[in-house]
Amino acid sequence: MKSAKTSHGSPERTEGHSMNGLRVYINPEVTEKSGGYGVFYSRRESGPYYRWRYEEKVSSWRGARVQSSDFSPRLLSTTNWKVVPAALQKSMIEHYQE
């Protein structure tokens, strides 16, 4: 998989798809787990935040839009694209594909 990283470690372009402005986050204050995996958040440019959880029953990553009233973005910390599981990377690419 080819990808260039932005200065914050998120993908800029992946597999030929434009991923400009995509940032991936974790909440280091709370150990969030789902299906044995950590929970991730994403946001593209000034768009909405999405929470990504692994659902064991369907063996798939699911993203859901998070309302600002449901969490505090200030608690999130950017994370490196390399720590994002490959299946989640694929789900995010499909979600944000232009």
Image: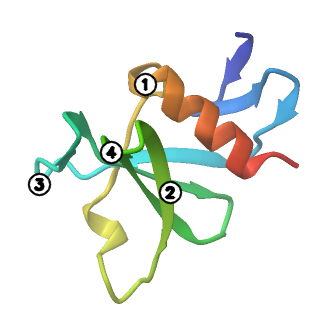
Residue type, mark 3 in image: Val
Q: Which disc number belongs to residue 57?
A: 4
Residue annotated with mark 1? 85
Whether residue 8 is visible, yes or no, is no
Left or right? Give the position of 52 relative to 17. left
Q: Residue furthest front?
A: 57
Q: CA distance from mark 2 to mark 4?
A: 15 Å
Quadrant housing the N terminus: top right
Q: Nearer the viewer, residue 36 or 26?
A: 36
The mark that comes first in sequence, 2 or 4, is: 4
Residue shown at 46%/43% (left/top)?
61
Q: Which disc number belongs to residue 30?
A: 3
Q: Would you place residue 46 above or below residue 34 in this image?
A: below
Marks 4 and 3 close (CB-CB < 8 Å): no
Q: Residues within 10 Å of mark 2 (few under 14, many from 20)?
A: some
Nearer the camera: disc 1 or disc 4: 4
What colour scheme does the image use? rainbow
Residue annotated with mark 2? 63
